[in-house]
Image (spheres, rainbow, N blue to C red):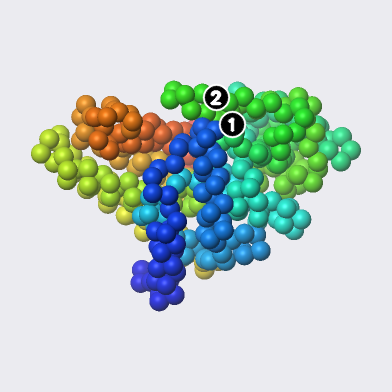
């Protein structure tokens, strides 16, 4: 791994920084978990795509820039440095897009990838069901083959971005006699399909970041199947690897939070509780360690390697780091840490509470950390399975 940037990479960084400085909105956009905020973020995604920055490592013919993963890391650093908006279509661009590139037919790539890159079509993730959370192999929603269509029945819940999405990707059981991870098929479902009902789920703050989706004999073309019939588990595991690995949570996200935490401590050092300084330093070091490890992984990928089960290590590390950074911030703030961003007395620190509330979901989504520890024990350490 070479930590010295080339002149071409320096020029790429300068170009990205200049574009972002000229185009990033001056104030924060409304939350994309609201109808108005979702429209705002779609407009931002259109501007990002028009500038050629929507998904920099994708091939040009699919709406990308043709950059490599190192350049993507550089862009992410500049994106967070500029305080640019969150990505409303992260399920599409970071999870489904790479999965289509690996498993999709040429027709599927041409049909879906450009509209994912531009966020003309926003995607929801349809994994969880009422009785199948982290244990995706317990999925019961069915897809019965009927001619050139699948007929869907069942329910998905906690569908991320489901309230304002156009499409959903998920697993359905196509072999009714199958059990566990066998007999599942990966399907792409337009949410406007007759027989599909989307019900937003209100969070504690009243916003709708999730939805439950019901399928009542909804028909989806066989052409919307990604990978082979009854082979969906392998496709889904690739998607989960992207979710736990590099793309969904770039190191720049945590470096940005760590820098803000350092600034917060410096501004409140006189009143910070005992031990806060050491915890802030630890958080900053861990964010840097995650960055270096990601660069090492990218270097291996560029040399022809692959991400394996170590993606579970990544997921545990960044999710628990995120919680720890926000908990540290709230301890530094004391009673001010209980203020929402819109509170007059918050004086610019209210985002820490909102960030902490979201960070608590990190050890849950993308497969709970308890499940990831099982994966590490069995698949990496070779420990026996407990019964």
Rendered image: mark on residue 239: none
* Residue 307 image offset from top left, x and y in percent: 52, 55
Residue drawn at 33 percent across, 36 percent down: 351
Q: Residue furthest bottom?
A: 7
Tell me which numbered mark, 2 or 1, is placed earlier along the sequence: 1
Depth order, front residue of 276/88: 88
Quadrant of the snapshot with the N terminus: bottom left
* Residue 227 image offset from top left, x and y in percent: 73, 48
Depth order, front residue of 191/172: 191
* Residue 117 image offset from top left, x and y in percent: 60, 53
Quadrant in which residue 183 is drawn: top right
Look at the numbered disc 1 and give the secondary structure of its residue.
helix
Residue drawn at 23 percent across, 47 percent down: 262
CA gap between label 2 and label 1 equals: 8 Å
Depth order, front residue of 315/188: 188
Does residue 85 lie above or below 296 as drawn?
above
Residue to which mark 2 is pinned: 201
Crowdedness near tag 2: few (<14), some (14–19) or many (≥20) residues, C-alpha within 10 Å: some
**Is residue 139 shown left or right of residue 46?**
right
Residue drawn at 12 percent across, 35 percent down: 271
Q: Residue furthest right?
A: 147
Residue drawn at 57 percent across, 58 percent down: 50
Q: Residue furthest left?
A: 270
Look at the numbered disc 2 and give the secondary structure of its residue.
strand
CB contact under 8 Å: marks 2 and 1: yes
Residue to which mark 1 is pinned: 163
Does residue 49 lie above or below 373 as drawn?
below
Crowdedness near tag 1: few (<14), some (14–19) or many (≥20) residues, C-alpha within 10 Å: many
């Amino acid at each position: 791994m070479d930590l010295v940037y080339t002149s071409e990479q320096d020029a790429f960084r300068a170009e990205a920084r200049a574009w972002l400085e000229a185009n990033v909105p001056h104030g924060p956009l409304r939350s994309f978990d609201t109808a108005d905020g979702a429209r705002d973020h779609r407009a931002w995604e259109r501007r990002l795509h028009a500038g050629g920055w929507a998904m920099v490592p994708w091939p040009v013919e699919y709406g990308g820039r043709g950059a490599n993963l190192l350049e993507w890391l550089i862009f992410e650093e500049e994106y967070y440095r500029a305080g640019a908006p969150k990505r409303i279509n992260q399920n599409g661009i970071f999870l489904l897009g790479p999965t289509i590139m690996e498993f999709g037919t040429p027709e599927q790539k041409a049909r879906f990838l450009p509209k994912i890159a531009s966020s003309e079509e926003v995607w929801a993730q349809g994994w969880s069901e009422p009785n199948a959370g982290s244990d995706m192999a317990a999925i019961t929603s069915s897809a019965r083959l009927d001619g050139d269509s699948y007929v869907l029945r069942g329910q998905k819940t906690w569908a991320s971005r489901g309230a304002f999405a156009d499409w959903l990707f998920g697993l359905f059981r196509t072999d009714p006699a199958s059990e566990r991870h066998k007999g599942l098929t990966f399907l792409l479902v337009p949410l406007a399909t007759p027989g599909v009902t989307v019900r937003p789920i209100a969070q504690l703050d009243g916003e709708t970041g999730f939805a439950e989706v019901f399928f009542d004999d909804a028909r989806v073309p066989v052409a919307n199947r990604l990978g082979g019939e009854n082979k969906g588990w392998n496709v889904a595991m690739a998607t989960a690897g992207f979710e736990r690995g590099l793309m969904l949570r770039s190191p720049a996200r945590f470096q940005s939070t760590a820098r803000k935490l350092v600034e917060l401590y410096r501004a409140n050092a006189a009143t910070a509780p005992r031990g806060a300084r050491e915890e802030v330093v630890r958080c900053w070091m861990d964010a840097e360690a995650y960055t270096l490890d990601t660069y090492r992984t990218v270097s291996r990928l560029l040399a022809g390697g692959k991400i394996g089960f170590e993606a579970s290590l990544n997921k545990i590390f960044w999710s628990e780091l995120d919680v720890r950074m926000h908990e540290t911030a709230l301890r530094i703030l004391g009673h001010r840490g209980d203020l929402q961003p819109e509170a007059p007395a918050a004086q610019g620190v209210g985002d820490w509470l909102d960030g902490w509330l979201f960070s608590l979901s990190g050890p849950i989504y993308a497969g709970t950390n308890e499940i990831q520890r099982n994966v590490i024990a069995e698949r990496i350490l070779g420990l026996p399975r407990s019964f």
